[in-house]
């Protein structure tokens, strides 16, 4: 299908509205993306026609709901090129997936004296679960530093890797800086020392092709709502041999084989990790989002977003008093910046008055803010439905804010 942004925008009803009297410009896609009509339809269709609990009913609706839920698992596995859909665990989102790995793989395999390696640019979701695991086990958290462009310092990473390193946990695409980390090379270096690797793909999966087999990554986490699917659903990918060894996390229905008061036995992956009734409608609608992304083509998406980011970065260079935070060579979809004399929260509010939605804050990446010695940034984050005209609107609103504050 040829990429036509005007046609694509018609698929997103939410984009067709006015905010404070202006056509909405939605540039907060890193926080959550908007949903195309086919995803909204998949959700309502499920509740109108198929709603039933899965994996347990003998009746038609339950069989239909189960088949659609499992088909969604297959679509998600295929989207990241997993060898088998059994390596896909449905969870609430990237945050829950990381906590699952920390509390199952981590509790089993990591102990006092071990080191867990994260990077300075991680989202809090890829820091705090490891800090909690360190408190529980006596392991130590080590941090890969970055340079002033917002790139991880690879020499320091290699220095930090050692025989005590028990796990490397890094982001694929930084939500605060837009940096695309060289995860394939980092995984190779970690594996050379026998260190397993978790990649936080929460931001990446909407913007680039991910191939977990080519990356040889051990754990990869994702959130549906950041890739045009519903909130409250996401996935953990893990290699089958790791899942087989990992103990279950939540106990309850659907994750067991047998239960008696003398003890219980557990199902195999993925069900071993999916206790309780899951977000069935959410998973099915996420599958619709993946069909939609595949129909457009990730190569077209990446090319369009690359053009948008280049256009916005070029405009940003021409604004006196604007400093881009995050100038890595390899970046995607995110423009984070500060403006002299205007607090990001004030700026965000003024932009909203002009109909432009951005995020202002620390973006759940406080160590990034500490490194740059700032409290917050204003962040414009792009999706394939954004246009250069919308970026012009952003910069017109920024000029207006500068005028107000001058
Ligand atoms: N990892 C990264 C890199 C993220 O950007 C986020 C959310 C998460 C993990 C957590 O994802 P969740 O779906 O489990 O919440 N990032 C953002 C953001 O940039 N603005 O709001 C949420």
Image: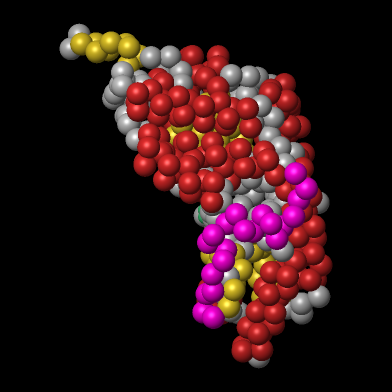
User: The N terminus lies in which quarter of the figure?
Assistant: top right
Which one is in front, 307 or 55?
Answer: 55
Q: In this view, does 253 lie above or below 232?
A: above
Segment colored magenta: 1-21
Q: Residue at x 57, y 63 (%)?
A: 15
The image shows residue 145 at horizontal and vertical percentages of: 67, 47
Q: Residue at x 43, y 42 (%)?
A: 45
Q: In this view, does 239 lie above or below 362?
A: above
Query: In this image, 50 relative to 154: left or right?
Result: left
Q: In this view, does 382 lie above or below 344?
A: above
Query: In this image, 251 relative to 241: left or right?
Result: left
Whether the magenta-drawn stretch holds residue 3 is answered as yes
Count all numbered tags in the image, as a single digit: 0
User: The C terminus lies in which quarter of the figure?
Assistant: bottom right
Q: Quadrant of residue 52?
A: top left
The image shows residue 81 at horizontal and vertical percentages of: 66, 27
Q: Which residue is drawn at 41% across and 21% down?
A: 271
Q: Quadrant of residue 181?
A: top right
Q: Quadrant of residue 405?
A: bottom right
Q: Is residue 119 above or below residue 372?
A: above
Whether the magenta-drawn stretch holds residue 219 is answered as no
- Residue furthest out toward the left: 261
- Residue furthest out toward the top: 262
Q: Is residue 341 at all visible to an observer of this figure?
A: no
Q: Name the colour scheme.
A: secondary structure
Which one is in front, 349 or 183?
Answer: 349
The image shows residue 402 at horizontal and vertical percentages of: 66, 84
Q: Residue at x 46, y 29 (%)?
A: 68
The image shows residue 212 at horizontal and vertical percentages of: 66, 28
Q: Is residue 315 at all visible to an observer of this figure?
A: yes
């Amino acid at each position: 299908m040829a990429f036509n942004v005007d046609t694509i925008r018609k698929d997103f009803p939410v984009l067709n509205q006015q905010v404070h009297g202006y056509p909405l410009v939605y540039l907060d896609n890193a926080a959550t993306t908007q949903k195309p009509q086919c995803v909204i339809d998949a959700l309502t269709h499920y509740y109108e026609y198929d709603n039933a609990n899965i994996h347990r009913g003998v009746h038609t609706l339950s069989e239909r709901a189960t088949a659609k839920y499992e088909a969604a698992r297959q679509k998600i596995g295929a989207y990241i090129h997993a060898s088998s859909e059994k390596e896909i665990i449905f969870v609430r989102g990237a945050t829950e997936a990381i906590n699952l790995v920390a509390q199952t793989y981590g509790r089993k395999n990591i102990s006092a004296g071990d080191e867990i390696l994260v990077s300075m640019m991680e989202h809090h979701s890829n820091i705090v679960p490891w800090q909690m695991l360190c408190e529980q086990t006596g392991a130590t958290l080590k941090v890969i530093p970055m340079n002033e462009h917002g790139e991880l310092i690879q020499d320091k990473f290699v220095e930090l890797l050692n025989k005590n390193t028990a796990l490397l946990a890094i982001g694929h695409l930084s939500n605060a800086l837009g940096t695309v980390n060289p995860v394939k090379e980092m995984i190779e270096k970690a594996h050379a020392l026998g260190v397993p690797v978790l990649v936080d793909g929460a931001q990446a999966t909407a913007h680039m092709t991910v191939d977990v087999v080519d990356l040889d990554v051990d754990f990869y986490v994702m959130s549906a709502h950041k890739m045009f699917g519903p909130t409250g659903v996401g996935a953990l990918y893990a290699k089958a041999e790791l899942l087989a060894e990992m103990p279950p996390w939540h106990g309850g229905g659907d994750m067991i084989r047998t239960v008696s008061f003398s003890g219980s036995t557990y199902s195999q992956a993925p069900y071993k990790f999916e206790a309780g009734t899951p977000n069935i409608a959410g998973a099915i609608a996420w599958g619709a989002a993946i069909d939609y992304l595949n129909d457009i083509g990730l190569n077209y998406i990446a090319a369009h977003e690359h053009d948008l980011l280049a256009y916005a970065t070029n405009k940003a260079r021409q604004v006196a008093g604007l400093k881009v935070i995050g100038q890595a060579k390899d970046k995607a979809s995110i423009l984070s910046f500060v403006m002299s004399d205007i607090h990001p929260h004030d700026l965000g509010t003024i932009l909203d008055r002009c109909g432009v939605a951005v995020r202002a804050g620390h973006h759940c990446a406080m160590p990034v803010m500490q490194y740059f010695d700032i409290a917050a940034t204003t962040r414009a984050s792009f999706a394939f439905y954004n246009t250069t005209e919308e970026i012009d609107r952003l910069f017109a609103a920024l000029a207006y804010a500068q005028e107000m504050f001058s």
